Amino acid sequence: MDGTYFDWLYEHVRPEISPELLQYTKVCALAHQIIFDWSVPNDDNRSAEGRELRREFYESLDVGSRPDKDWMALDASIFEVLIALARRCDFIVENGLPWWFDVFMGNLELDHYNDALWQTSDRNRVNRMLTKLNERRYRPNGKGGLFPLEHPKKDQREVELWYQMSAYMAENKMY
Protein backbone atom coordinates (compact mmCIF):
# COMPACT_ATOMS: atom_id res chain seq x y z
CA MET A 1 0.00 0.00 0.00
CA ASP A 2 2.73 2.49 0.91
CA GLY A 3 4.37 2.30 -2.54
CA THR A 4 1.03 2.88 -4.23
CA TYR A 5 0.28 5.73 -1.86
CA PHE A 6 3.70 7.31 -2.44
CA ASP A 7 3.15 7.12 -6.22
CA TRP A 8 -0.27 8.75 -5.77
CA LEU A 9 1.29 11.54 -3.69
CA TYR A 10 4.13 12.06 -6.15
CA GLU A 11 1.65 12.32 -9.01
CA HIS A 12 0.34 15.52 -7.36
CA VAL A 13 3.66 17.32 -7.74
CA ARG A 14 4.83 15.56 -10.89
CA PRO A 15 1.67 14.70 -12.84
CA GLU A 16 3.56 13.51 -15.88
CA ILE A 17 7.05 12.33 -16.54
CA SER A 18 8.13 15.09 -18.84
CA PRO A 19 11.52 16.52 -19.80
CA GLU A 20 10.77 20.03 -18.54
CA LEU A 21 9.99 18.89 -14.98
CA LEU A 22 12.91 17.86 -12.81
CA GLN A 23 12.17 14.66 -10.95
CA TYR A 24 12.69 14.39 -7.20
CA THR A 25 11.64 10.82 -6.39
CA LYS A 26 14.60 10.20 -4.09
CA VAL A 27 14.18 13.45 -2.15
CA CYS A 28 10.44 12.85 -1.85
CA ALA A 29 10.95 9.25 -0.72
CA LEU A 30 13.25 10.50 2.04
CA ALA A 31 10.79 13.25 2.99
CA HIS A 32 8.05 10.62 3.15
CA GLN A 33 10.07 8.61 5.67
CA ILE A 34 10.46 11.53 8.10
CA ILE A 35 7.61 12.46 10.41
CA PHE A 36 6.68 16.15 10.33
CA ASP A 37 7.42 17.68 13.73
CA TRP A 38 5.02 20.52 14.43
CA SER A 39 6.75 22.23 17.33
CA VAL A 40 5.13 25.61 16.68
CA PRO A 41 1.50 26.06 17.77
CA ASN A 42 -1.06 25.66 14.99
CA ASP A 43 1.33 23.78 12.70
CA ASP A 44 -0.61 20.73 13.84
CA ASN A 45 -3.12 21.96 11.24
CA ARG A 46 -0.53 21.40 8.50
CA SER A 47 0.04 17.90 9.87
CA ALA A 48 -3.71 17.20 9.88
CA GLU A 49 -3.97 18.35 6.26
CA GLY A 50 -1.11 16.02 5.37
CA ARG A 51 -2.89 13.09 7.01
CA GLU A 52 -6.12 14.03 5.22
CA LEU A 53 -4.42 13.08 1.95
CA ARG A 54 -4.62 9.46 3.09
CA ARG A 55 -8.41 9.62 3.19
CA GLU A 56 -8.45 11.10 -0.31
CA PHE A 57 -6.13 8.37 -1.52
CA TYR A 58 -8.25 5.65 0.00
CA GLU A 59 -11.40 7.10 -1.52
CA SER A 60 -9.69 7.19 -4.91
CA LEU A 61 -9.18 3.42 -4.68
CA ASP A 62 -12.94 2.93 -4.56
CA VAL A 63 -12.63 -0.35 -2.65
CA GLY A 64 -15.77 0.07 -0.55
CA SER A 65 -14.14 -0.78 2.77
CA ARG A 66 -12.76 1.38 5.55
CA PRO A 67 -9.08 2.34 5.65
CA ASP A 68 -6.84 0.85 8.31
CA LYS A 69 -7.27 2.98 11.45
CA ASP A 70 -3.65 2.55 12.52
CA TRP A 71 -2.40 3.79 9.13
CA MET A 72 -4.79 6.72 9.16
CA ALA A 73 -3.65 7.71 12.69
CA LEU A 74 0.08 7.81 11.87
CA ASP A 75 1.68 11.23 12.02
CA ALA A 76 2.08 13.00 8.69
CA SER A 77 5.36 12.83 6.83
CA ILE A 78 7.21 15.91 5.63
CA PHE A 79 6.26 14.94 2.08
CA GLU A 80 2.55 14.79 2.92
CA VAL A 81 2.79 18.21 4.59
CA LEU A 82 4.60 19.68 1.58
CA ILE A 83 1.85 18.50 -0.74
CA ALA A 84 -0.91 19.76 1.55
CA LEU A 85 0.86 23.10 1.90
CA ALA A 86 1.37 23.35 -1.87
CA ARG A 87 -2.39 22.86 -2.24
CA ARG A 88 -3.03 25.71 0.18
CA CYS A 89 -0.60 27.95 -1.66
CA ASP A 90 -2.16 27.06 -4.98
CA PHE A 91 -5.63 27.81 -3.67
CA ILE A 92 -4.48 31.36 -2.97
CA VAL A 93 -2.15 31.83 -5.96
CA GLU A 94 -3.02 29.43 -8.75
CA ASN A 95 0.28 28.40 -10.28
CA GLY A 96 -0.21 24.64 -9.98
CA LEU A 97 1.13 22.16 -7.45
CA PRO A 98 4.24 21.33 -9.53
CA TRP A 99 5.15 25.03 -9.59
CA TRP A 100 4.72 25.39 -5.83
CA PHE A 101 6.65 22.19 -5.24
CA ASP A 102 9.54 23.60 -7.30
CA VAL A 103 9.41 26.79 -5.18
CA PHE A 104 9.67 24.64 -2.05
CA MET A 105 12.58 22.63 -3.48
CA GLY A 106 14.40 25.85 -4.35
CA ASN A 107 13.70 27.55 -1.02
CA LEU A 108 14.80 24.44 0.87
CA GLU A 109 17.91 24.33 -1.34
CA LEU A 110 16.98 20.79 -2.38
CA ASP A 111 16.67 21.59 -6.08
CA HIS A 112 20.28 20.44 -6.59
CA TYR A 113 19.25 16.93 -5.55
CA ASN A 114 17.00 16.05 -8.45
CA ASP A 115 17.08 12.50 -9.80
CA ALA A 116 19.34 13.40 -12.73
CA LEU A 117 22.06 14.72 -10.41
CA TRP A 118 21.50 12.31 -7.49
CA GLN A 119 24.48 10.51 -6.02
CA THR A 120 24.41 7.92 -3.25
CA SER A 121 26.28 10.30 -0.95
CA ASP A 122 23.43 12.85 -1.25
CA ARG A 123 21.15 10.83 1.02
CA ASN A 124 22.81 12.04 4.25
CA ARG A 125 22.92 15.67 3.09
CA VAL A 126 19.24 15.64 2.12
CA ASN A 127 18.31 14.01 5.43
CA ARG A 128 20.17 16.78 7.25
CA MET A 129 18.40 19.46 5.22
CA LEU A 130 14.98 17.92 5.89
CA THR A 131 15.85 17.65 9.59
CA LYS A 132 16.89 21.32 9.55
CA LEU A 133 13.42 22.18 8.20
CA ASN A 134 11.70 19.92 10.70
CA GLU A 135 13.65 21.28 13.68
CA ARG A 136 13.36 24.86 12.41
CA ARG A 137 17.10 25.36 12.36
CA TYR A 138 16.93 27.60 9.32
CA ARG A 139 17.83 31.28 9.51
CA PRO A 140 15.62 33.78 11.40
CA ASN A 141 14.53 35.27 8.05
CA GLY A 142 13.37 31.82 6.91
CA LYS A 143 16.29 31.14 4.55
CA GLY A 144 16.72 27.38 4.36
CA GLY A 145 13.02 26.93 5.16
CA LEU A 146 9.95 26.94 2.95
CA PHE A 147 9.25 30.67 2.95
CA PRO A 148 12.36 32.90 3.17
CA LEU A 149 11.79 36.64 3.53
CA GLU A 150 13.93 39.66 2.77
CA HIS A 151 12.26 41.76 5.47
CA PRO A 152 10.72 39.56 8.17
CA LYS A 153 8.85 41.20 11.02
CA LYS A 154 9.55 38.24 13.35
CA ASP A 155 11.94 35.33 13.68
CA GLN A 156 10.42 32.91 11.16
CA ARG A 157 11.51 29.90 13.21
CA GLU A 158 8.84 30.88 15.72
CA VAL A 159 6.07 31.64 13.21
CA GLU A 160 3.57 29.01 12.15
CA LEU A 161 3.85 27.93 8.52
CA TRP A 162 0.50 29.47 7.55
CA TYR A 163 1.73 32.95 8.52
CA GLN A 164 5.13 32.32 6.95
CA MET A 165 3.32 31.44 3.74
CA SER A 166 1.16 34.57 3.91
CA ALA A 167 4.16 36.83 4.54
CA TYR A 168 6.08 35.17 1.70
CA MET A 169 3.22 35.72 -0.74
CA ALA A 170 2.76 39.32 0.39
CA GLU A 171 6.46 40.15 0.20
CA ASN A 172 6.71 38.59 -3.27
CA LYS A 173 3.54 40.43 -4.40
CA MET A 174 1.79 37.21 -5.34
CA TYR A 175 -1.67 38.59 -4.53
Image (cartoon, rainbow, N blue to C red):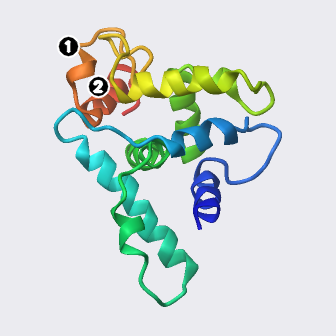
> What amino acid does circle 1 point to?
Lys
Kind of element beneath mark 2 = helix
Which label number is shown at residue 167?
2
Q: Of 166 and 2, which appears nearest the observer?
A: 2
x and y percentages locating residue 160 in the rendered image: 23, 32
Find residue 98 and report its image quarter: top right
Q: Of 49 and 102, which appears nearest the observer?
A: 49
Asked if residue 107 lies left or right of residue 171, the reply is right
Q: CB of mark 2 within 8 Å of CB of mark 1?
A: yes
x and y percentages locating residue 84 in the rendered image: 42, 50
Q: Quadrant of the N terminus?
A: bottom right
Q: Is residue 129 above or below residue 96?
A: above
Q: Is residue 9 above or below residue 156?
A: below
Mark 2 packing: few (<14 Cα in 10 Å), some, or many (20+)? some
The residue pinned by badge 1 equals 153
Q: Is residue 129 above or below residue 57?
A: above
Kind of element beneath mark 1 = loop
Mark 1 packing: few (<14 Cα in 10 Å), some, or many (20+)? few
Find residue 29 and report its image quarter: top right
Report whether residue 110 is seen.
Answer: no
